[in-house]
Image (cartoon, rainbow, N blue to C red):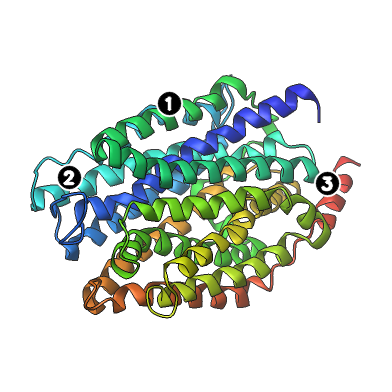
Amino acid sequence: MKHNRFFMILMYSLGYLGISVFTQTAVKWYQYYYTPPQFNMQGLKILVPISLIGFSMIVARMFDGISDPIVAYYSDKLNTKMGRRIPFVLFGSPVLMISFIMIWFPPVPEVSIINFIYLTFVLSLFFVSFTAVVAPYLALIPEITKNAKERITLTMMQGITQIIGVMVAEAGSGILIGIFNFKIMGIILGIFAFITLMLTPIFVKEEKIEEENIPTVGMFTSIKMTLTNADFMYYLTAATALWFGINTLTIAMPYITEVLLKTPAEESGFMIAGAFVVAVLFSFFVPKLTLLYGKKKLLMVFSIMFAGILALTGLFGTVFNKTVSIIIVLLAGIPFSVFFVVPNAMIADIAELDGIKTGQRREGMFFGVQGFVIKIVIGISSLVTPLLFKIFGYSAENPLGLQLCGPLAGSIVLLSLIVFSKYSLTEKELEKYKLDSKK
C-alpha cells in the first residue's frame, strides 16, 4: 500500500473514533442520567419516569430508521465536486455535535414530562444527524479500497479506532463525570468527537464515479433490490442480533455494576474499556484469521462466544464474585474485535458484488438499510431493557430484571446464527466476478 493511500485510509479510519465516542457515550449514559437508581453516588435526581424512558429512545430510533434509506438514496445519487459521500460528513457533523451536547442539558432539574419531551426531541435530532453522517461515511469503504487485503486492513484500522472510541466513551466519560459532571463531560467529548470526524472531509479524496454507474432507480426500488439480496439478508440477521446484545449490555452494565457488584456505576466504564483493550490487542490477528478461514466462519464462531458471555452476566454477584465478573467482561473483548472489523468488510463485499451484477453503485443503500434495521432493533433493545427492570426489578433486593438481560440477549444471538449459516458469498467468488467484469 503506497504511503499516501495509507495516510488517507488512516485519516478516514480515525473518523470512526468520533463516531464511536458519540454513540457509545449517549447510549451508555442517557438512561442512567435521566433515570438513575434511587440511591446513586452522583447525587442525581430522576428526571424522567422509568416507565417512559424507553419510549424516548424508540421514538428517536424510529425517526432515525426512516432517515436511513432517505440519506442512503441521496448519498448514492449525489454528484458534486467533493463526491457523493463527503458533503454529508462535512455538513452533518456540526449538527451531530450540538445535538449530543444538548442531551446533557435537560430543561427541568426534577422529574417532569417536559424532560421526556425534550429528551425525545434531542435524541431524535442526534440519531437523525448521526445517520446523515455515518451512512455515507461507511459507504466510502468499497470506494476507497482496491482489493480484499486493503479492505480488511482498512476495516481493521477502523475497528481499532472504533474500539479506542468506545474506551474513551466508557472510561473517559466516567473520569470526566467524576472530576466535573455530566454537562462538562458532554461538551468535552462532543468537541473531541467532532474534530476526529472532520479528518475525513479534510484528507479523504473521493473518487469520481462514472455517470453510467450512478443509480437510476427510484428510492423504493433501490430498497427493494437491497432487501431481495439473499446474502445481505442472511448477514443482516446476525448483525442485528449482535447489536441487540451489545446495546443490552451497554445499557445494563452501569446498573449491574452498582446493584449486583456493589461498585460505583462509573466503574462499569473501566470494565468495558478493559474489554476493548483486549479487543485492540486481538484485532491485529483478525485480518490473518479472516484470510485463513473466511469472514463467515469467523463471525459465527465469535458470535457463539459472545452469546455465552452475555448469558454469564446473569450470574454476576451471585455465582461469580467481582473479580471473576471482571474477567468475563474482559473476555468479551475477543469477540468485539471481530465484530468491529468483519461486518463492515462483509457488507462492502455484498455491495460491491451487487454493483458488478447490476451496473449501479448503491453502496449507500446497503449501509443505509443496515442502519435502518439495526437502529430499530437497538430501539427495541432500549425499550425491552427498562421494561425488564420495571417488571422484574433492578434493585439490590429484587435484581431479577438485571439478571435476565444477558441470557435473553445471548439466546437471540444464537438463534440468529441459524439464518446466518445460509450466507454463501466468499472472497474467491467476489474476486472472480471482479476479474470477469474487467474482461
Q: Distance between the residues labelled 3 and 2?
A: 50 Å
Marks 3, 1: nearer the viewer = 1
The amino acid type of the residue labelled 2 equals Tyr
Q: In which quarter of the image is residue 271?
A: bottom left
Q: Mark 1 points at which residue?
A: 91
Q: Quadrant of residue 214?
A: top right
Q: Mark 2 points at which residue?
A: 118
Most foreground residue, 9 or 135: 9
Q: Could you tell whether 294 is left or right of 392 in the image?
A: right
Q: In which quarter of the image is residue 416?
A: bottom right
Q: Measured from the top left, where is residue 153 in percent x and y?
A: 73, 42
Q: Residues within 10 Å of mark 3 (few under 14, many from 20)?
A: some
Q: How far apart are marks 3 and 1 (CA)?
A: 34 Å
Q: Could you tell whether 61 is left or right of 49 in the image?
A: right
Cβ atoms at labels 1 and 2 below 8 Å apart: no
The amino acid type of the residue labelled 1 equals Phe
Q: Measured from the top left, where is residue 317 in percent x and y?
A: 37, 74
The amino acid type of the residue labelled 3 equals Lys
Secondary structure beneath label 2? helix
Q: How crowded is mark 1: few (under 14 residues within 10 Å), some or many (20 or more)?
A: some
Q: Which residue is drawn at 47% across and 58% down?
A: 374
Q: Give the number of the disc on residue 56.
A: none
Q: Mark 3 points at which residue?
A: 434
Closer to the N terminus: mark 1 or mark 2?
A: 1
